[in-house]
Image: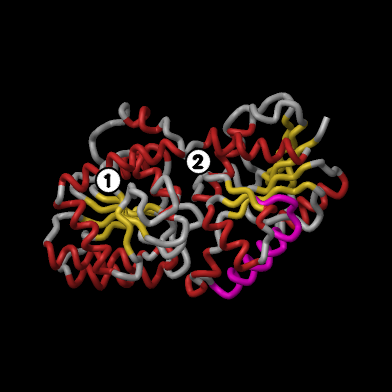
Amino acid sequence: MNHIGIDGSRYFLKQRTGIEEYSYQITKGLRNKLNSQQVVLYVRKNQEIDFSLPENWKIKVISWPRFWTQIGLSWELLFHPVDVLFIPAHVVPIIRAKNTVVTIHGLEYEFCPEAYSFWERFYMRFSIKNSCRWAKTIIAVSENTKKDLMKLYGVAENKIKVVYEGHDNKLATHNSQLETQKKYDFKYLLFVGRLEERKNISGIISAFEILKEKYQIPHKLVLAGKPGYGYEKIESQSRVIMTNLKSKEEIIFTGFIGGEEKENLIKNAEVFLFPTFYEGFGLPILEAQNLGVPVVASNNSSIPEIVCSGLTATDEKSAVLVDPNDIGAIAEAVHQLISDKNIRDDIIKKGLENVKRFSWEKCAEEIAEVLRSES
């Protein structure tokens, strides 16, 4: 029986962002799809798994404190090799299986270098370039990511398989049972994600200022997520704008939110803002669409691919797409969705239809197929 090893080091974090959520959902999804293989799930010390595993799965705790992947996981694979190794988050270990499969989520640091420290850019470029060289198969989360890998890193096309990230469409049913009372009893625009320069938070805040001054909208702006690179600048900008607006409560920072609180926050938003500078996929867009919230997003990277069923400019889009560098365009798009019910309802309807294209079940099945073919 073939052995498949899965890197679980980023799965079981309490505050999961995009890549961690991907890793977590794929692990859950693979449980019943690798029945004829022995599966080893490698985790860090003190990580807790909150779902059951089949009998053919076993957990291996690797307690190495630093450089977990390159030292701890490599050491384990040296003495206990596997036939296939799956790395769901970028970094392939130096010692690895001959048949290694890695998921690359995007090359944000190449397109938005100013949004990363020198060390972050160096580490990510070094590790991902090597991961592309060392892996036998690369899973790209979008056609755009595949194109970037081929263009920037010279990866052969036949080495890359595109498997879209998933989405839990069951949330739509679950949400009908949630309390309808809003945590915030006012109208608001919403961004959910890491609060950093690459996410264009400064642009969102500036667009919000235009909306308040030009259109006198009653809405507030809610920014939900962990602080990231450039957060101090973002926070300073928000203070200046709130002073200009003569209110200290127009922009709200919630910190990290998850689970039911996140669903409720998205569900009750007037507009979901996601005009970021680069996305490997753009999962928050689907989360908002699934909850019936209209989306304003960027017209760059993978986003047009995610919000429409085709890849051409003539395809109907399920979100209002704008140039993220055009603050006025962001503001106008939001105002259009707030003020024109027909346009708003049309975008919501298209969004609810769009999310049907994506599921974690489908994503896990396609990845399982890749892993089975390598074993």
Q: Residue furthest right?
A: 79
In screen coordinates, is 290 left or right of 363? left
Please provide percent x and percent y for residue 291. 33, 39
Q: Answer yes or no: do the residues labelled 2 and 1 have beta carbons within 8 Å?
A: no
Please provide percent x and percent y for residue 246. 15, 68
300 relative to 86, above or below: below
Q: Quadrant of residue 222?
A: bottom left
Q: Nearer the viewer, residue 321 or 126?
A: 321
Which residue is denoted by mark 2 in the rendering?
Answer: 166
Mark 1 burial class by Cα count in 10 Å: few <14, some 14-19, many 20+: many
Q: Nearer the viewer, residue 158 or 2?
A: 158
The magenta span reads: 117-138
Q: Secondary structure at mark 1?
A: helix
Q: Quadrant of residue 241?
A: bottom left
**Earlier-in-chain disc, 2 versus 1:** 2
Instruction: Identify the mark at residue 4; answer none if there is no mark.
Output: none
Label 2 to label 1, Cα distance in Å? Answer: 21 Å
Q: Amino acid at mark 1?
A: Ile
Q: Residue at x 29, y 65 (%)?
A: 205
The C terminus, quarter of image? top right
Identify the main secondary structure in magenta: helix
In screen coordinates, is 26 left or right of 68? left
122 in magenta: yes
Which residue is denoted by mark 1 in the rendering?
Answer: 347
In screen coordinates, is 7 left or right of 356? right
